Amino acid sequence: MRQVVKQGLAIALAGWAALAVPASSQRPALAMLDQIEPGRWEIRLRDGTRRSYPICVDNGRKLIQLRHDALNCERLVIDDRADEVTVQYTCRGRGYGRTSIRRETGRLVQIETQGIAEGLPFDFAAEARRTGDCGG
């Protein structure tokens, strides 16, 4: 009986010690996006047309909402790894989306996104590459 109490106490202490790990040892949410270099980026669609368009990226998180740019949307992080993130977001009354971003380097990422914008569905894959600094 005494041995069981000692084991229970040891387990409780181990659990408490695990909770005492400082929060600073955890990496911040979506930290991978913070490693993307700011500047002028070219988004090249991988749909056979090879259409592309420029975008000024001040923060890698801007790549999450390409079809809902500049909208304040609620976000839910689905997957948050060192080289890839997936975020689902809802823009009340404006649509929603789900975006996965895979970082190859700080200047090259792969994006897959789908959802509803302006009442219409969207679904595309793209390569985004930093091409220089944003103009003033």
Image (cartoon, rainbow, N blue to C red):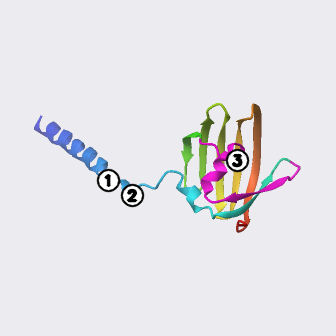
Near mark 2 (Cα within 10 A), the count class, few <14, some 14-19 or many ≥20, is: few
* Side of 100 where 76 appears, left or right: left
Which amino acid type corresponds to the residue marked 2 in the rendered image? Ser
Q: Secondary structure at mark 3?
A: helix
Which circle, 2 or 3, is nearer the viewer? 3
Please give the name of the residue rendered at 10% of the width and 38% of the height, measured from the top-left corner. 2
Residues in magenta, as a range: 48-72
Residue matched to label 1: 21
Magenta stretch encompasses residue 53: yes
* Side of 71 where 5 appears, left or right: left
Which circle, 3 or 1, is nearer the viewer? 3
Please give the name of the residue rendered at 66% of the width and 38% of the height, measured from the top-left corner. 97
Q: Which quadrant holds the N terminus? A: top left
Q: Are marks 2 and 1 in contact (CB under 8 Å)?
A: yes
Q: Secondary structure at mark 2?
A: helix
Q: Which quadrant holds the C terminus? A: bottom right
Residue 66 pos. (x, y %): 70, 47
Near mark 1 (Cα within 10 A), the count class, few <14, some 14-19 or many ≥20, is: few
